[in-house]
Amino acid sequence: MEQLSKMVKLDFEVVEHIAGIRPTVKDRRPVIGSNTQHPHVKVFNGMGTKGISLAPYFADIFVDHLLLGKEIPLNVSIDRFLK
């Protein structure tokens, strides 16, 4: 709450807090691609604790996909959950 107070200049109140859960995927790999139901929605997430080193590499892959139509490797593609 102290950190949030430094970022926002609004009054707020914590109404309820049950648990802090860190979401993850089974294979612990990044998730990159387009939402199949909403193709205009793009996903670039799941870099985890190694994000500082992984993000630049996967950002290049994602940009090539968006601008050049190159395939995203299946091991990080959102499509791996649909096959």
Image (cartoon, rainbow, N blue to C red):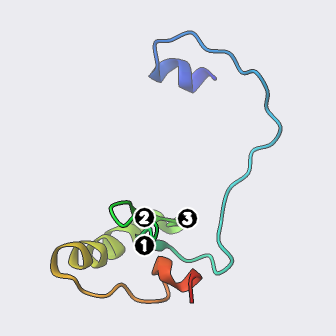
Q: In the rendered image, which quarter is residue 40 located in? A: bottom left
Which image quarter holds the C terminus? bottom right
The residue lying furthest to the front in this view is: 37
| Residue topped by disc 2 | 43
| Residue topped by disc 3 | 48
The residue lying furthest to the right in this view is: 18
Local secondary structure at mark 2: strand
2 and 1 marks in contact (CB < 8 Å): yes
The residue lying furthest to the left in this view is: 68
The three-letter code of the residue at mark 3 reads Gly
Place of residue 43 in the rendered image (x, y in percent of width and height, measured from the top left) = 42, 64
What is the C-alpha distance between the residues marked 3 and 1?
13 Å
Q: In the rendered image, which quarter is residue 63 located in? A: bottom left
Q: Residue at x 56, y 26 (%)?
A: 3
3 and 1 marks in contact (CB < 8 Å): no
Residue 32: assigned label: 1
Which image quarter holds the N terminus? top right
What is the C-alpha distance between the residues marked 3 and 2?
14 Å
The three-letter code of the residue at mark 1 reads Ile
